[in-house]
Amino acid sequence: MNSFLHAEPRDQVMLVRIESSRLTADVAHRIFAEVLQTMSGAPALLLDFRSVEFMDSTAIGELVLLGKKLRADGTAYAIAGLKPPLMSLITMMRLDQIMHFGENVDSALEWLNQSLAMGTRNP
Amino acid sequence: MQILIVEDDVALRRAFTAMLEKWGYEVVQAADGEEAWQLLQRQPIHFLLSDWVMPRLDGVELCRRLRSAELPHYVYVILLTGKDQTDDLIMALEAGADDFLTKPVNARELRVRIKAGERVLRLEKALLAKNQELQQANRKLESSQQRIQRDLQAAAKIQQDLLPISRQTGLPIDLAWALMPAEELAGDIFNFYPLDERHLGFYLIDVSGHGVPAAMLAVHLAKTLSVEPRPDSLVHLPRNRLDNARNRASLGFFRLGRRKTPDTVPGSKSFRNPVEVVTHLNENLQADDRNMMYFTMIYGIIDTLSGQGSLCQAGHPYPLLCRGDGSIEWLGVGGFPVGLLPNADYQAIDFQLQPGDRLLLYSDGVTECPNEENIQFGADRLGQSLCAMRFLPLEETMQQIKKALIAWHSPSADAVSFSDDISLLLIELCAQS
């Protein structure tokens, strides 16, 4: 496992914590590519963003691209623990309408498990 | 290899010469240091075997002269002497000798020491070749760097030329603007133009990322949003749609826009409304895995006679409206960036300007501009600054906002270097005369 990610399975959900405080153009593509590698067939992904303090515009674009790939693979996903300034940015870009953002890991896990139980995937 | 033997004793010199030639070396002879020095300056000799005590110029002095001269190659020096004292050894090495042999010379020892010298010379030769290669590569890099710098400056000039030239639009509207790029080239771009005798079109775009790719997309967008009547101009309606619209208008129809995004700017128009413009851009410029580029933007239109306006916010910071009475309003409710999501729905944001009201568009480089403690300038501070200066002329207000940002970012630095592009476009509706 590399130093940017910490992954642990929680039943059907792969919980991946981003351990870099700054997601920028330099690293975002590689980090999200590695997120996909950690999935190893799990039907759902929960990305824990609690350590992330800053995301530049390229990193936000890469996050949307990751969402598109997961959607294409039929993988349910959610994001948890985004800091308020980053959440404001997400709201401004309306990305909360295409991805689920949970306040914390527990609430996002609950949402993901419900989605899996109901056979629904993403917003 | 050539070896220069310097020995004033003729018999010894001949003996050394015979021995060295037997070992396969080409020998050059000199009877003293002075003669050797003359030869060394004329011929590319790399190996010197020299006696210590000689008339005119001794071995140690020859060494010193050799080391202080700037010969184009290294000369390996073995000093031969009858002396066998530590002090003498130190003096010889300090003078620049590489090795030291005492007489009478043991032939086998001399031979292995010459071999050792040859190894040093081979290394020196390889190092010299590598050094020359590096110097050549460095020259190429410098030349390439200069060319890139010239290209960047030329590209920056082209980009500058795409910015507004004059605040005179022929409309009852005043404008001020600023662009401070983080690098030579900016990913931010903005402009405004009269669309007809009463409507002003304006936009501000922030392309994701920085540098050349972002700047090239910004330039492409500036051309696409050009008001010039070109077949591919996005701001104008295509000719066939314009004719249909005029026919419908004559039959009592009014709207030109898509039904789900009603046209909010009144009057007969030959241009697309903001939602249409942004939707077209989004449909035609989708980012993909290889090209992770998208942009945020505001595109708007103001009817300068009625003060009625409409804009489309696409992932861009909320436009700031400072009313004549000093109150602040933030326009918009968010919107998808352009180029990330195909089929994204955009929304028209209507607003009404009164004379004296000021509308500010800005990139996130303004509000996210950090100070030395990494605190962002912030939207509230921007709004307060704008309203506090509402009695100043528009251009002076813009200069004051620029100064405030520079002071915030680097109060003590001589040359300000922002971490993100800063762009601002300020619009004020003038009182009708």
Image (tube, rainbow, N blue to C red):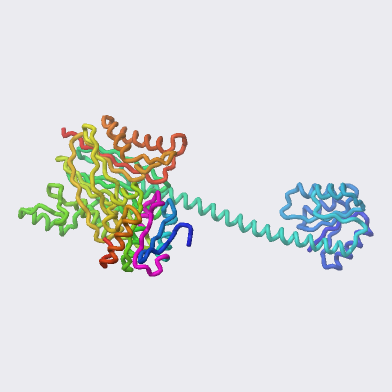
Residue placed furthest toward the left: B251
* Residue B30 seen in the figure: no
At x 77%, y 58%, the residue is: B46
Check the picture and name the quadrant holding the C terminus of chain B. top left
Residue B18 location in percent, x, y? 89, 65
Residue A40, magenta (yes or no): yes
Q: Is residue A2 left or right of residue B210?
A: right
Question: B203 above or below A28?
Answer: above
Residue placed furthest toward the right: B11
Q: Quadrant of residue A122?
A: bottom left
Q: Is residue B327 left or right of residue B405?
A: left
Front-most of A35 and B55?
A35
Residue placed furthest toward the bottom: A41
Front-most of A49 and B403?
A49
Residue B376, magenta (yes or no): no
At x 20%, y 52%, the residue is: B347
The magenta segment is A38-61
Residue B138 location in percent, x, y? 57, 54
Residue B354 location in percent, x, y? 18, 36
At x 34%, y 45%, the residue is: B364
Q: Is residue B10 left or right of residue A61?
A: right
Check the picture and name the quadrant holding the N terminus of chain B. bottom right
Question: B329 above or below B257?
Answer: above
Residue B287 location in percent, x, y? 33, 60
